[in-house]
Image: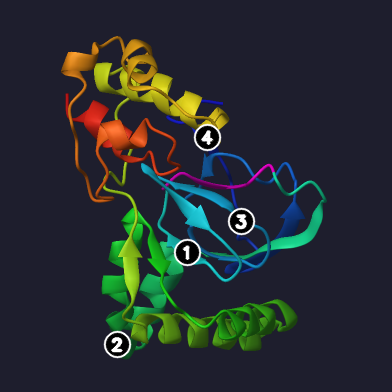
Amino acid sequence: MSIIQPEIEIVDRNRHSLRYLEHGWPTELCRWHSHAEYELHLIVATRGKAFVGDYIGDFSPGTLFLTGPNLPHNWITDDVWKTPVDTRDMLVQFSQSSVDSLAAAFTEFRELRQMLMTAQSGIEFLNFNPTFARGHMEAIRDSKGPERILAFIRFLVRLNEHAERKLLSVVNHLQPEGSGKQAKVGQVIDHIVQNFSEDISIDAAANMAGMTQATLPQFSGHHGASVCGICEPCPHRAGLWHALCDR
């Protein structure tokens, strides 16, 4: 599946306004996909690479993310983990309409809007106590009815109070299908996702993009990495996406 054509996941919210899910690794649930809901996502086991929009970074136990509507994402555990894991991910999905209804009924909840707007590009909550995060997720999982909603709101309020955050994706929406930029980005990023543990030379990246080394810019993006650095033995290659998009 192409990095620029994520699988669209349909979440059934006819019976419940929140969807709680936990799963292990490996599983078919782990794939490059997007959906109309926000997703609060806690990693509880293994280490690997997080792909959120145009961002590529590391995850480890305790890493906590919030992704916005229609923002593609995936978490891939490193190959060194040979033994299956029963529980790697704990997550909650919720809709924009639910949040809007909450803010309409209780104006105090409008304080959450800025955090949710930022989540359109993806957020990693840095140094959030992993024990507390897991406790909040378990409270949501183990509750039903109004108690589940209250447990979820408590978690959102705590996160809104947490100041240490990292914005993940520079581009929070995909390029229209068939554009020249899309084709160049897709060809290279597809290769990176499928072979992210391997080194990629500048020559190889340029060839895949239909460019020359001379035209591949020395790009420094929000990750602070140049294209040359990304194409060397280094896992943080997301800046390559930005370099190609800027051409």
Which residue lies under the disc numbered 3?
Answer: 47
Q: Which three-letter amino acid code belongs to the residue tagged 2?
A: Thr
Q: Position of residue 215 (x, y in %)?
A: 17, 17
Q: Which disc number belongs to residue 107?
A: 2
Cα distance in 3D space between marks 1 and 3:
14 Å
Which mark sits nearer the N-terminus, 3 or 2?
3
Please tell me which residue lies in front, 231 or 90: 231
Which mark sits nearer the N-terminus, 3 or 4?
3
Q: Which residues are magenta?
A: 71-79
- Please say which color scheme the image uses: rainbow
The C terminus lies in which quarter of the figure?
A: top left
Please tell me which residue lies in front, 97 or 1: 1
Which residue lies under the disc numbered 4?
Answer: 196
Q: Are marks 3 and 4 in contact (CB under 8 Å)?
A: no
Which mark sits nearer the N-terminus, 1 or 3?
3
Give the SS element for disc 1: strand
Q: Position of residue 24 (x, y in %)?
A: 75, 56
Q: Quadrant of residue 243?
A: top left
Cα distance in 3D space between marks 3 and 2:
40 Å
